[in-house]
Image (cartoon, grey):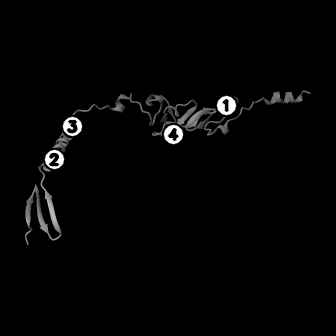
């Protein structure tokens, strides 16, 4: 069975068992599709050209080991000269502000330069060192303000005996 074709106002129609089906012939749609295809091809060629130029252009390289002058924000170190902050604590570069806080002796790791351990008379708070209040002391590695204790005075034993003997 051949369909019944009819041309009507720019549309081609044909009869089918379910009713009329219309196909729209639009030259502007075809022109838009072709223009879009050309645009995408031009963009692809431009990106490809830029990418190939980037690979073919000589790049400046720096050999860090041979120059010895490269500094790092974080990483391993033996002294502060290898660190951007100028501070090496516990074999790792310390970062500003926590790792460079007064009293910090060790920093965490080669990827984290915050303070790990504080000196005596300091305690660690939020990965930074804080001094104990005046008249208080703490041991190295203290973790909270509760570790700061009233400073004890030491009296030589001979003097203490003499003080106790006096009426």
Give the image location of residue 161, x and y in percent: 85, 30
Mark 3 or mark 2: which comes first in sequence?
Answer: 2
| Label 3 environment density (alpha carbons within 10 Å; few <14, some 14–19, many ≥20) | few
Mark 2 surroundings within 10 Å by alpha-carbon count, few (fewer than 14), some (14 through 19), many (20 or more): few
- Residue 133's tag is 1
Q: Are marks 4 and 2 in contact (CB under 8 Å)?
A: no
Residue 71 pos. (x, y %): 41, 30
Q: Which mark is residue 50?
A: 3
Name, please, the residue furthest toward the right: 167
* Disc 4 to disc 3: CB gap under 8 Å: no
Question: Considering only order in the chain, which callout, 3 or 4, is on the residue closer to the N terminus?
Answer: 3
Q: Position of residue 48 (x, y in %)?
A: 20, 41
The local secondary structure at tag 2 comes to helix
Q: Quadrant of the N terminus?
A: bottom left
Q: Residue at x 51, y 39 (%)?
A: 108
Q: Is residue 72 left or right of residue 128?
A: left
Q: Quadrant of residue 63?
A: top left
Q: Closer to the observer: label 2 or label 1?
A: 2
Reading the image, the residue beneath label 2 is 32
> Whole-Å distance between the Cαs marked 1 and 3?
62 Å
């Amino acid at each position: 069975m051949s369909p019944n074709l009819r041309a009507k106002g720019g549309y081609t129609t044909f009869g089918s068992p379910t009713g009329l089906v219309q196909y729209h012939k639009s030259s502007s749609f075809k022109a838009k599709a072709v223009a879009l295809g050309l645009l995408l091809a031009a963009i692809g060629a431009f990106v490809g050209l830029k990418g190939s130029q980037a690979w073919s252009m000589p790049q400046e390289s720096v050999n860090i080991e041979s120059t010895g002058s490269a500094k790092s924000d974080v990483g391993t170190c033996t002294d502060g000269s290898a660190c951007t902050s100028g501070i090496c604590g516990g074999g790792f570069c310390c970062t500003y502000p926590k790792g460079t806080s007064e009293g910090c002796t060790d920093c965490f790791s080669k990827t984290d330069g915050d303070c790990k351990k504080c000196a005596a008379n300091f305690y660690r708070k939020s990965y930074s060192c804080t001094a104990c209040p005046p008249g208080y002391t703490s041991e190295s590695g203290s973790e909270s303000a509760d570790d700061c204790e009233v400073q004890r005075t030491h009296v030589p034993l001979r003097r203490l005996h003499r003080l106790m003997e006096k009426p």
